[in-house]
Amino acid sequence: MKSAAALLKQKFAPLPSCDLKGRPFVNKPSLGKKLAEYKRHPFSLVMMVLVILSALATAAVVLWIVIHVIMQGAPNLKASLFELEYDSENLSLMPAFFNTLIIAGMSLLIAVPVGVAAAIFLTEYTSSANKFVAVVRMAAETLAGIPSIVYGIFGMILFVEMLFKGFSLIAGILTMAIMILPLVMRTTEEALRAVPDSFREGSFALGAGKLRTIFRVVLPSAVPGIIAGVILALGRVVGETAALIYTSGTVKAVPDSLFGSGETLAIHMYTLSSEGLHVDEAWATAIVLILLVLVINGAAEFISNKFRKRY
């Protein structure tokens, strides 16, 4: 006798997409029908061509940048760049690599919970006609468009000069958290608003409360969109230079604590190239930076796909 889970799985199994002979149920228009449709509506053909050209141009620009960086940097990758301690001989990037991971991880650890909680409040507990919500959204959009150098000067005045009395990783972490908070909040809010209201209504109909519905129904469904916002925020932190130069400093070492100064990969690459003496090592650092971003994005995409399959 089949179990209840097996019966439910059989009852709600997805419908087949083709018949027994393998012919699809959905009739796809032939090439002739498509051409006839485009002849009747030439604007559709123009828009389709523009969309395809835009996609090809975007892919071509990304590939050109990646290939150019690889061609310039790959010949300059050497073992000395990956030594644990930096000196004037090896020009190691490892201290900057570890500082990048620390600043990126800690800033996300601060900004993501606050941003997600703020988005939940604005989406689930307030009305869109509320004037307070409108003010908060306008403030978030304004903060998201402020240049990073402004955040750097703000962080230097508040954290470097007033609170911690010097450059430090914690000053850079707090500055980055403030900078990416509006981005995380707005992307999470859009992801929560994209969840159909029927999900909430079904949960309420089954007797679940507001908080349980949010954490067991709404948030899991919105995880892919939230992760997309986190990826954007992470990319901004990893590639940031202006704000971190004024807060975390340019010391080429991993500090003993968060109150010590240290540079990130982006700053390390900037200092090497600006000196004009180690441009080849700067190209090699750029490869490591691109690989770091690709690995992080790949991991985030893997997690996002897991949630899509589960929910």
Image: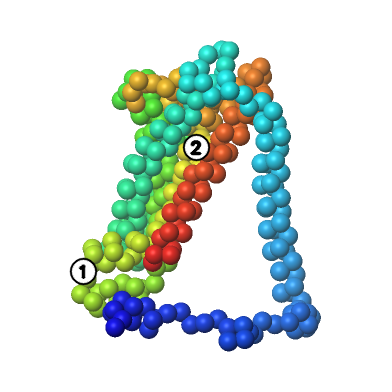
Dot 1, how many residues are within 10 Å of its Cα: few (below 14), some (14-19), or many (20+)?
Answer: few
Image point (43%, 59%), residue name: 306
287 versus 54 height, above or below: above
Image point (37%, 83%), residue name: 11
Residue situated in front as seen by the camera: 50 or 258 = 258
Q: Which residue is mark 2?
A: 238
Image point (59%, 29%), residue name: 285
Residue situated in front as seen by the camera: 4 or 61 = 4
170 versus 121 height, above or below: above
Image point (67%, 36%), residue name: 70
Q: Return the x and y of residue 279 as percentages of the image width and height.
A: 66, 23
- Indicate the quadrant containing the C terminus: top left, top right, bottom left or bottom right: bottom left
Q: Label 2: state its secondary structure.
A: helix
305 versus 256 height, above or below: below
Q: Return the x and y of residue 20 as percentages of the image width and height.
A: 58, 87
Choose the circle earlier in sequence order: 1 or 2. 1
Residue situated in front as seen by the camera: 234 or 148 = 234
Along the horizontal axis of the image, is 66 left or right of 176? right
- Indicate the quadrant containing the N terminus: top left, top right, bottom left or bottom right: bottom left
Q: CA distance from mark 1 to mark 2?
A: 39 Å
Residue situated in front as seen by the camera: 156 or 234 = 234
Three-letter amino acid code at disc 2? Answer: Val
Q: Which residue is mark 1?
A: 209
Along the horizontal axis of the image, is 309 left or right of 70? left
Q: Return the x and y of residue 4 as percentages of the image width and height.
A: 28, 79
Q: Return the x and y of residue 283 as percentages of the image width and height.
A: 64, 29
